[in-house]
Image (cartoon, rainbow, N blue to C red):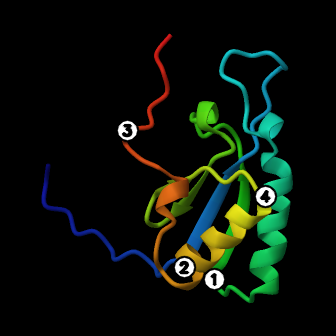
Amino acid sequence: MPDVPVPSDPPPYFRAHVFVCCNRRPDGHRRGSCAARGSEKLRDYMKARAKELGLEGVRVNQAGCLDRCEFGPTLVIYPEGVWYRPETPADVDEILAAHLQAGGRVPRLMLTEKDVVPKG
């Protein structure tokens, strides 16, 4: 590859970007879906709580399929690329406090490289 100068990237627009899977598959689909497991309500709750907490530079967005619905509901936080599987508003509160306020993690809710979608 030729030595072409690359301009520096602009600063990030958000310090953290949270994508909540709200994919909905037909009832009875073998993979299930995050929306059928309550992700839309959790997304709405997370958006409202992040605003209430005054989390500056944090954007909570709906995402289409993140390809891990078997573990749903799922969300991923960038720029770190950390995946979680919250099931309740209390789980969302814990993620907001530990990850987005304190810069830590919530290991019991994390999806790791060991959580892979079954083939087939």
Q: Is residue 60 left or right of residue 98?
A: right
Q: Tell me what residue is drawn at x 63 percent, y 83 percent.
A: 57
Q: Residues within 10 Å of mark 2 (few under 14, many from 20)?
A: some
Q: Which mark is residue 114?
A: 3
- The first of marks 3 and 1 along the sequence is 1
Image: 84 above or below 95: above
Residue, disc 1: 57
The label nearer to you, 3 versus 4, is 3
Q: Tell me what residue is drawn at x 51 percent, y 57 percent.
A: 108
- The first of marks 3 and 2 along the sequence is 2
- The first of marks 3 and 4 along the sequence is 4
Residue, disc 2: 15
Q: Which mark is residue 120?
A: none
- Disc 1 + disc 2, Cβ < 8 Å: yes
- The first of marks 1 and 4 along the sequence is 4
Separation of marks 3 and 2 at Cα, in angstroms: 27 Å
Report whether residue 14 is seen. Answer: no
Label 4 secondary element: helix
- The first of marks 1 and 2 along the sequence is 2
